[in-house]
Amino acid sequence: MTDLEVLAKSVSKETEDKAVDARIAHLLQTVGNRVRKARSEIGLSRRALSERSGVSQRYLAQLETGQSNISLALLMRIAEALDTRIGAFINEPLSAGASPDNEHLVNRIAQASEVQRAEVMRILEASPQSTGPAQRIALIGLRGAGKSTLGELAAHKLGIDFLELNEEIERASGIAINEVIELYGQEGYRHLEFQALERVAKAHDRLVIAVAGGIVSQPETYNYLLKNYHTIWLKAEPEEHMDRVRAQGDERPMAGNPDAMNELRHLLKNREAYYARASTRLNTSGTSLDDTLDRLLVTIRKHAFLTS
């Protein structure tokens, strides 16, 4: 190889390295912007995100300004704390070879609101395997809405089965939910959640089931739930959600977090449009358990969710 060829190869390598560095810098900036946007959308302070994820505020500041070469492990923890998927931060746009029409469609979807994207998914995912809602009743809502308590009591009164979807996931995986998330991450948990929902629909034509509050943030899973279950949104005021969780002996929502109540209000506000897609809703605030149970049973009869 001549000196000129060696020089040309060296220049080419340097150019390639610079191009790779530029792509990495662009990716880091993109990830940072998406994390900051996700945090802002739910009204979460950087301090609160740090406490939820276990990632330092300094590191988060570097990440959000594109100055941190974050590991996937840490990014997964941040995604879980923001109740989203890691792919939402790192998914690449269509390649240069993609058709303009497809690229335009992807860009439009990327700019759409979460509710609009969920509606697109509902239209696109008309599943031929859908069994319809049959006589399956699913209770949805934030933690502390009364899904488990009211669901079990209502199922007993109606003489039908009651299931907690998380318990079904635990039975299938053989480990506790917190271990599922620790081992597989939020993405893995959501995958198991969808599988469990399908299994329950195939095995039961008549039951009451309580699902996790975050199920509405997963379009594919939530759309499947809406198609295959009669859904009832158990709605309550943020203060009652918090009081009920604490009454269960769980002080974690408030521990060392003075903004916990504001964060809960933001979460409820952001999810309200999703919960509103349910078949019907029932306000559980300001009433006794017995009264709420009676109104839940009336709601089930009124909408003929159980035909016999």
Image: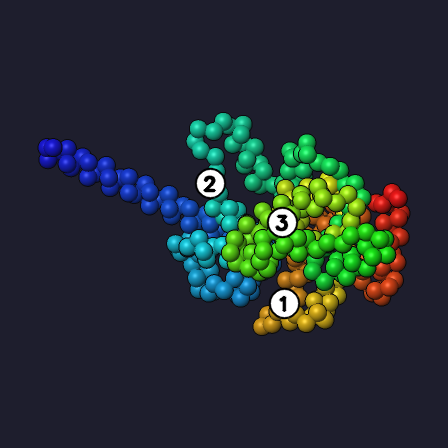
Front-lying residue, 179 or 255:
179
Q: Earlier in the sequence, mark 3 or mark 2?
A: 2
Residue 2 is at least partly visible in this image: yes
Whether 126 is drawn above or below 77: the answer is above
Find residue 219 and report its horizontal and vertical position in percent: 64, 43
Q: Are marks 1 and 3 in contact (CB under 8 Å)?
A: no
Disc assigned to residue 13: none
Q: What residue sits 49% from the left and 27% below the top?
A: 99
Neighbor class of circle 2 (other Cα within 10 Å; few <14, some 14-19, many 20+) is few
Answer left or right for 51 relative to 26. right
Q: What residue sits 75% from the left and 66% below the top?
A: 240
For discs 1 and 3, the disc positioned in front in the rendered view: 3
Neighbor class of circle 1 (other Cα within 10 Å; few <14, some 14-19, many 20+) is some
Find residue 69 and report its horizontal and vertical position in percent: 39, 54
User: Given the image, on which type of amino acid does mark 3 rest?
Assistant: Glu
Residue 139 is at least partly visible in this image: no
User: Given the image, on which type of amino acid does mark 2 rest?
Assistant: Glu
Q: Secondary structure at mark 1?
A: loop
Residue with the mark numbered 3: 193
Find residue 247 and report its horizontal and vertical position in percent: 72, 71
Mark 3 and mark 2: Cα distance apart in space = 26 Å
Q: Earlier in the sequence, mark 1 or mark 3?
A: 3
Q: Secondary structure at mark 3?
A: helix
For discs 3 and 2, the disc positioned in front in the rendered view: 3
Residue with the mark numbered 1: 253
Q: Earlier in the sequence, mark 1 or mark 2?
A: 2
Residue with the mark numbered 2: 92
